[in-house]
Amino acid sequence: MFGARQGSGFLLSERLVLTARHLLGEDETTTVAVPGGRPRIACRTLWVGDADADDAALLLADEFLVTPGSTLFETVRFGRIDSITALLECHSLGFPRVQRYDGQKLSMEQFRGTIKPGSGILRGEYVIEGTGTPPAALEDGGSPWAGMSGAPVFSGGFLIGMVAKDAAGWQHSRLNAVPLERLLDTTGFAEIYRVHIGEPPQCTTLRQVPDNSPQFEDRYRAYVAEAFGELTIFGLDFSRSEHAQWPLDSAYLSLELVPGHGESEVGAAPERGRVETSLRGQRRVLLRGTAGSGKTTLVQWLAVNAARDSFSEQLSHFGGRVPVVLPLRTLVRGAALPTPAEFLSAAGHPLSPPEGWMDGVLTEGRGLLLVDGVDEMPEVDRARTKDWLLKLLTAYPHTAVVVTTRPTAVDDGWLSRKDFAEFQLLPMNQRDVTSFVRRWHTAARSITPKVSGRNELDSYEQQLLSALPRKQDLARLATNPLMCAMICALHRDRRGFLPESRMTLYGAALTMLLVRRDAERAVRAPEGLSLSEEAQQKILQEIAYWMIRNEIAEAEQRDVVDLIARLLPAMPRVTAPNNAARVFRFLLHRSGLLRAPTTQTMDFIHRTFLDYLGARAAIEAQDINLVAAHAHEPQWEDIVRMAVGHARDGERAALLTKLVELGDAAAEKSHDISARIHLLAAASLEHATSLDPGVRREVERRAAALIPPQNGEEAARLSQAGPLVLDLLPGPEGLSEQEASGVVRTAQLIGGEHALQVLREYAEHPAISVRAMLASAWSSFDTTNFAELVLARLVTTDLSIWVYSAEQLAALHLAGVVPHVTFHGDLSPEGIASAARAVGAEGITISDNSQLRNLGTFAERPTSLTNLTLDSCHEVTDYSGVAGLGLKRLSLYGVYVSLSALGSLTDLPALELTMLGDSAEPGMLTLPGDLPVLPSLTQLHLDLLIDGDTDARRLRERFPNLRRLLLYLESNDVVTVDLSDLAWVPYVEVTITNGPVHLKGAQLASVRHRHPPAKDPS
């Protein structure tokens, strides 16, 4: 603020300012400016404190200092100190002289220190002793802290004082402050505050105990980084327990996401992207993914990087936050979900935080809540979980949250009230699988001491990488990290044998975990008893089935021990019922299938094994009707499919017949439920080794009625039936555009060599939406195979092929002629130029590329380019290469560049220029003074932020041959834009995108408003 001298202040509202009294002059006009807000605004004084005691004042600005309704303003929390115990970790924000730069420009300083109430108690002041070395006195002898007067003083989230002066005699190491509690007791201050804020000021007494929060937070971050820094994987050397752990840093694989529920609208290419790209700027996320898709791994990765503050720039909005992993399977055991103070203990973390620490973290907006596994809760508990989350975010609105769930466990938009963005983890593509296999074997080699063992792993790695693309059944299984890890483990364990089906894979994995690891280590009854594989599976499957029936993913250990005790009388060769606790400990410690999240609970290491074993128990109990009755429930889908695989011929026929009947009966009430049951029956056929032909026909007939799919949701649901669907998908003849898109999407989701044969039939489809979806499927398949089989046949007229990776960049030439290509991400500029020449591209778009610095690479050799678009390529500063490209259209979206940087465009004979987004500068219509004349420009498209009245008179001077002008205007203030001088432009279109913009001479243009038009300010 500026009065008799420059000082600082604090915004209590959009117009009300708290500052120091001694800054106000007798005759001078007091003005206030807010960084990032309005320029200086005049203020009038509403209240001043006592001249001898309360060096404070309240000012009211003549205009809003920031945008009205700003979310910056919450009710101020005032604090008081009621003893002389030092209050640690206080800070103040202001504009002292010592921080000035470049000719006395103001800059903010954050002064940190400890309040020593006893030092100023007789003067009625707070004394703040700074941390670190104090600044030196200024050359003119003045205080380096001049300008800090009026700055607010905070302890945590509480405003407790206001800087008044630099304490004399302390070499600028202390500041004195006015206690805010004194002002709150002043009638005038309290009344003015109430009138302008809408409620009386409230004051909280702060704890007068040493604040150990910083030290605890350092300990907690270190704990999270270590506790979540490893993953348990299958099939490494189990001779030492630590060999089953894989460092997260080497294990983490950034998978792809798509917005929403995973199904794009028919005709639209899915907006897929890696985790870092998709979650950029997203503060609240609901992440869906199938079992084993990597949800929990992603949660661990987010937690570790937040703890280390090591996120890349793309996820910098998560940086510095305190991560809290909240596994819902653990939290739901309580009668009520935990309060913030109970988070760590409820989640089983051993550290005890200082009182109020978690509340402070969330209040200050520094928390990152990682809520894992909504699907692992009973359905009846999901409503209260949602209510718990909504209330948390109402109380702590600046908290970042990531919630994970299986795809169908909750409805679309489940948390949309709190602005959650929804994403779904996509299946791993061939590149992901290849990368995972290599990482797995690298980790295995790192803990294999013998050279011969490492050489064997080299051989296994190459065998597996060669076999996966050829063995379609196996490749289809390798679509998520869990399945990839088991395939790698079993391939090694069986010295090159590869299971052919999912049921075989699970069965082999169980054998390896239950028997092989202890047998290979020659471990003899470490728990005092020995259980055969058959006995272990019998007890485990009964535990699993009991948990499934009771809809729990995590159970109390005492309940499981009671269950085992009831099973043991029928298993006399195992042990006596009174040894049930020992049997449980054996299974927990030796089976490799159970774990103890807390000392009181247990669960299965993955839901997949729970479903597999529970399904076997259901079949053995002859509970066919019970299994079928739950077929419409998403959490029972895998159980039903595996039950078909476990069943004998007669049981299998009875179960599938029951599914057909239930699906038929459900059709009267719900088409979706009917379709889900019929498709589930069809999906289960892959596990039906033998089946009555009549039953198979009935199942396939119901599935055929659902084909072709009519939209993306139906395609996603249909794809769950697996490769069987590919044999039922029709060719493009006779299909509508919507149906054809649904078929393409279904084949993409199923994947595999057979799917490629289906997709290539659609490569010449007349509908651009079908061909766009087909092109977008490239990342789901082997790069080279897709380019040769599909892209080479694809009609690319009016279509852009998207290139996301170096592999696709290298394979693009296989597609033949491609008129337009979009290159997304940090691809090599040289590679982009070479690929564009190879396919004869006439138009290219380069987006989100930080490697591109200039356009010289494209001008080195002749190209076919006529149209070039740069989107969010922030590092481009040199446009001199444009002149040599012969462009007709140049579009710049979100590019940090001034128009004056485009002087090379003067050499072009004709050009259409589009500039949108970050290129907009306030008052652009006045144009920079160094802007060259651009006679080649025939079309100009500008997106402008207007900060004051302006006109368009200079456009004719700089763009004399302009024929088409498209203006997108917005403003934060009431402004007038004069278009009267645009009569010389044949076509002018103006769109008001935001703010109170008034147009003069609007009759000369086609005008559109995206909100109600502004009133004439005159």
Image: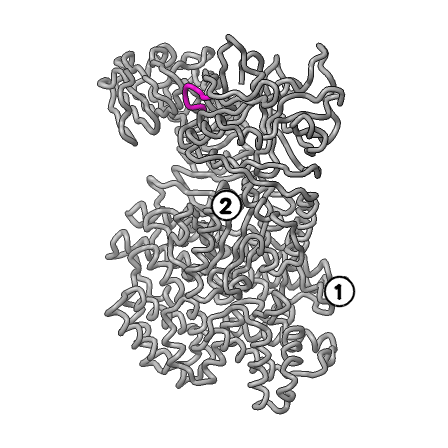
Q: CA distance from mark 2 to mark 1?
A: 57 Å
Q: Is residue 948 visible?
A: yes
The correct choice, above or below, for 396 with respect to 922 in the image is: below
Quadrant containing the C terminus is: top left
- Identify which amino acid the numbered label 2 is placed on: Tyr
Disc 2 and disc 1 in contact, CB within 8 angstroms: no
- Identify which amino acid the numbered label 1 is placed on: Ser
The correct choice, above or below, for 451 with respect to 798 in the image is: below
Characterize the local packing of mark 2: few (<14), some (14-19) or many (20 or more) Cα atoms within 10 angstroms.
Answer: some
Residue 495, picture quadrant = bottom right
Q: Residue at x 73, y 16 (%)?
A: 137
- Of all residues, the one furthest to the right in this rendering is 450
Q: Which mark is residue 452?
A: 1
Residue 70, picture quadrant = top left
Q: Across the whole image, how many numbered discs are drawn on residues?
A: 2
* Highlighted range, magenta: 60-65
Instruction: Return the residue at label 2.
Output: 396
Q: Residue at x 55, y 67 (%)?
A: 606
Residue 950 location in percent, x, y?
36, 14
Taking 254 as reference, is 823 left or right? left
Q: Earlier in the sequence, mark 2 or mark 1?
A: 2
Q: Which mark is residue 860?
A: none
